[in-house]
């Protein structure tokens, strides 16, 4: 065999090896995204995070001053609601960055997010009043805009609060 034949064989084997590495890397990337998705989902279903969402889902005052007074009277519930929204913001960040599939995330969580959108916005407003100039939970706020568009029937109007 001459050197041209050896070069062709080497190029062929190199292409096969490169293709194999690309295949393995893509499978690993998909697996890693799936693991992150499961971790995010597991975090969102932790009992204290669920309790925080339930707190937000209850009928609460819709006047910002009354919201603040309510949470000032219930600091443990404020902490739980805060944790739930902070975790939603992290999940939304992961979806925005492509670390998890955005469509899959919304498929599982858009209904839950829409049902607490109004109270979440009131809570966020309260927190922003506490921290002027702070860009609190921007990923969550953008995703709330989206879920309010795609699941409007689940969003409670402020008038429905007590």
Image: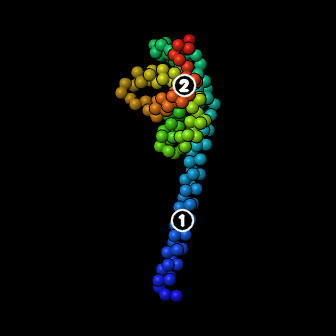
Q: Which residue is mark 2?
A: 152
**Mark identifier at residue 158:** none
| 94 over 125 or under it: above or below | below
Mark 1 or 2: in front is 2
User: Could you say where residue 77 lies in the image, as x and y percent from the top left?
Assistant: 56, 22
Residue at disc 1, secondary structure: helix
Please tell me which residue is depicted at 57% across the width and 32% down the height of the picture. 110
User: Could you say where residue 6 lies in the image, as x and y percent from the top left?
Assistant: 50, 82
For the question of whether residue 133 can be seen, the reply is yes
User: Could you say where residue 22 lies in the image, as x and y percent from the top left?
Assistant: 53, 61
- Name the foreground residue: 72 vs 108: 108
Q: Which quadrant holds residue 81?
A: top right
Please tell me which residue is depicted at 61% across the width and 29% down the height of the picture. 50
- Name the foreground residue: 49 vs 160: 160
- Name the foreground residue: 84 vs 109: 109
Please tell me which residue is depicted at 62% across the width and 38% down the height of the picture. 42
| Number of numbered discs visible in the structure rendering | 2
> Disc 1, disc 2: CB below 8 Å?
no
Residue at disc 2, secondary structure: helix
Q: Earlier in the sequence, mark 1 or mark 2?
A: 1
| 137 over 5 or under it: above or below | above
Q: Which residue is mark 1?
A: 19
- Quadrant for the C terminus in the image: top right
Q: Distance from label 1 to label 2 (Cα)? A: 46 Å
């Amino acid at each position: 065999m001459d050197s041209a034949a050896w070069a062709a064989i080497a190029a062929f084997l190199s292409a096969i090896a490169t293709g194999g590495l690309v295949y393995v890397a893509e499978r690993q990337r998909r697996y890693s995204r799936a693991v992150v998705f499961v971790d995010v989902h597991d975090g969102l279903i932790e009992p204290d995070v669920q309790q925080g969402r339930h707190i937000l889902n209850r009928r609460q005052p819709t006047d910002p001053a009354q919201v603040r007074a309510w949470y000032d009277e219930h600091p443990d519930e404020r902490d739980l609601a805060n944790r739930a929204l902070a975790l939603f913001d992290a999940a939304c960040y992961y979806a925005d960055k492509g670390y998890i599939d955005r469509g899959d995330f919304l498929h599982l969580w858009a209904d839950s997010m829409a049902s607490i959108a109004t109270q979440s916005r009131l809570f966020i407003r309260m927190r922003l009043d506490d921290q002027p100039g702070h860009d609190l939970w921007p990923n969550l706020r953008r995703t709330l805009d989206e879920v309010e568009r795609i699941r409007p029937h689940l969003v409670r109007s402020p008038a429905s609060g007590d």
